[in-house]
Image (tube, grey):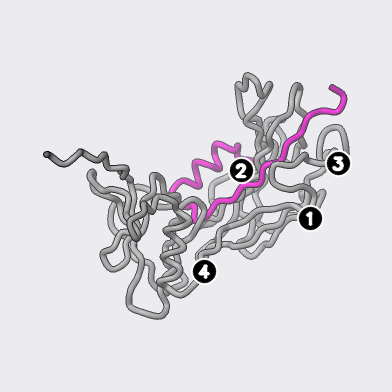
Amino acid sequence: MPAKHRSDPCRSFNFVVELDGVILGGFSEVSGLGANTDPIEYRHGPDDARPTLSGHALLPDHRTTRSPRLRKSTSDARAPRQHGALVTNPQRALLLVALLSGGPAMALELSSPAFGSGATIPTRYTCEGGDVSPPLEWRGIPSGTKSLVLIVDDPDAPDPRAPKMTWVHWVLANLPSDLKGLPEAVAPGALPTGTIEGVNDWKRTGYGGPCPPIGRHRYFHKLYALDRVLTGLDRPTKAQVEGAMQGHVLGHAELVGTYEKKGR
């Protein structure tokens, strides 16, 4: 009796993580790698490039000669198996890398003492209140970071039931890499030296708070760690900043708050 055919649950990936020839993880997209097709080895050194996988930085091995590698997969590369189970989760693969290399893989994290992830943004930070920027805090800046970018936008405009555009509320570029956050109601003059203020969709620089015309909208606060300081930008739009960031993102974190006008 012929053996029953068993479908392979593995799926193809664009990138894989290797250690000593063993594939630890597979990923569809990798920020910061660009079009590089050569293997990238993670070794000790402050200037090493460190692309990230889903916001996590791979750590070099400081204790042995083993070093995790990130490379483009071949067309037939498949998800790896670990003890008979598929390792398709980026966090699990990076945990394996960290265990083998003797260090924790810390993700870039963005938070606010004013509201939690998925929670309602307090009225003070909206057009129905003081319309001032909320306090923001972050940690886990990847090694090799030269600058930070902060973008706040609303993908639910004008109506979350039928969104037609993403409304940009705040754009900041070239925040210093050693910055730990921004205080509430930060004024342009209080921003760190060298910070570039971008233009929001009110055609002005600075923060513009949530002011949804209808329904409850989501507001994405997005922080990017870059391996370079951006140049050639003067009152840039969000699109111009994102274009300048291409191929230079080491890490990315998001904080999402929501808001619906109380007068509706």
Q: Where is residue 146 in the image (x, y as percent from the top left)?
A: 54, 61
Task: Indicate which disc, 4 or 3, sits on the residue closer to the N terminus.
Answer: 4
- Of discs 4 and 3, which sits in the foreground? 4
Q: Where is residue 24 in the image (x, y as percent from the top left)?
A: 35, 59
Q: Residue furthest bottom?
A: 63
Q: Which residue is drawn at the image coordinates 57% and 45% (left, top)?
A: 233
Neighbourhood count class around disc 2 (C-alpha, 10 Å): few under 14, some 14–19, many 20 upward: few
Neighbourhood count class around disc 4 (C-alpha, 10 Å): few under 14, some 14–19, many 20 upward: some
Q: Give residue 234's mark.
A: 2
Distance from Cα at disc 2 to Cα at disc 1: 24 Å
* SS category of the residue bearing label 3: helix
- Of discs 3 and 2, which sits in the foreground? 3
Task: Return the residue at label 3.
Answer: 124
Of 8 and 148, which appears nearest the observer?
8
Please determine whether, in this image, residue 165 is positioned above or below residue 118: above
Q: Which residue lies furthest to the front in this view?
A: 1
Distance from Cα at disc 3 to Cα at disc 2: 30 Å
Distance from Cα at disc 4 to Cα at disc 1: 29 Å
Assess whether mark 3 and mark 4 are in contact (beta carbons under 8 angstroms). no
Q: Give the range drawn in magenta.
A: 235-264
Task: Return the residue at label 1.
Answer: 183
